[in-house]
């Protein structure tokens, strides 16, 4: 189980395991914002397992959204489990818009969901070269989408 860590201004920062979250609470570095119904017991402590904690010190966040690496599941979710070339929903794979063999990177703006058929048809070409326009331009998620996703996972939405 993961615990969401919020800044002192309630901005989502990252997740930690339960042990780390409890350590932060015990040391007075954070306070619980939301607890689960589960209880943890030790010889010296009985407490509810936190779902989200807020840091008590000011944190300067230097990370950007681009620093969050895309995953297969995240790309499929962003693209609504739809091939970005034909609109199909069968046998989805990841496709590099600018082929990896030609310098394409594993970044949000270069990865799309594609059915096996379209991915094979496009091959080692760009969409323009293959005459296969994208249905929508790939983009990195916004901060609010990431925060919503983290809260949703933690709350079981």
Image (spheres, rainbow, N blue to C red):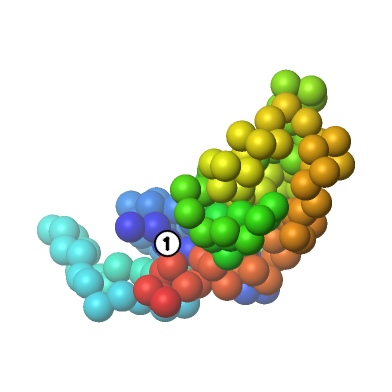
**Along the horizontal axis of the image, is 45 left or right of 107?**
left
In the image, 88 versus 153, the foreground residue is 88
Q: Which x, y percent locates residue 80?
A: 58, 65
In the image, 93 versus 138, the foreground residue is 93
Of all residues shown, which one is farthest toward the right? 128
What residue do we see at 50% from left, 72% from top? 151
Image quadrant in which you'd find residue 125? top right
Instruction: Please tell me how many numbered marks the rendered image carries.
Output: 1
Q: In the figure, 92 relative to 7: above or below?
A: above
**Along the horizontal axis of the image, is 45 left or right of 16?**
left
In the image, 78 versus 91, the foreground residue is 91
What residue do we see at 57% from left, 42% from top? 117
Q: Which element is circle 1 on? A: strand
What residue do we see at 51% from left, 48% from top? 92
Q: Which x, y percent locates residue 47?
A: 25, 71
Of all residues shown, which one is farthest toward the top? 101
- Residue behind mark 1: 3
Residue 38 visible in the snapshot: yes
What residue do we see at 54% from left, 41% from top? 116
**Mark 1 packing: few (<14 Cα in 10 Å), some, or many (20+)?**
many
In the image, 103 versus 85, the foreground residue is 85
Q: Which x, y percent locates residue 43?
A: 13, 58
Q: In the figure, 36 relative to 64: above or below?
A: below
């Amino acid at each position: 189980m993961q615990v969401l860590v919020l800044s002192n201004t309630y901005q989502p920062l990252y997740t930690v395991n339960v042990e780390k979250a409890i350590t932060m609470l015990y040391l007075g570095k954070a306070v619980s914002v939301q607890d689960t119904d589960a209880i943890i017991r030790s010889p010296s402590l009985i407490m509810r397992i936190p779902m989200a904690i807020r840091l008590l010190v000011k944190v300067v966040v230097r990370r950007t959204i681009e620093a969050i690496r895309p995953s297969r599941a995240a790309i499929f979710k962003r693209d609504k489990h739809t091939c970005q070339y034909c609109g199909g929903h069968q046998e989805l794979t990841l496709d590099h818009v600018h082929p990896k063999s030609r310098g394409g990177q594993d970044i949000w703006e270069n990865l799309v969901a594609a059915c096996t058929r379209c991915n094979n048809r496009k091959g080692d070409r760009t969409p323009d070269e293959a005459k296969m326009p994208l249905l929508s331009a790939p983009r990195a998620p916004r901060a609010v989408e990431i925060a919503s996703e983290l809260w949703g996972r933690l709350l079981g939405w």
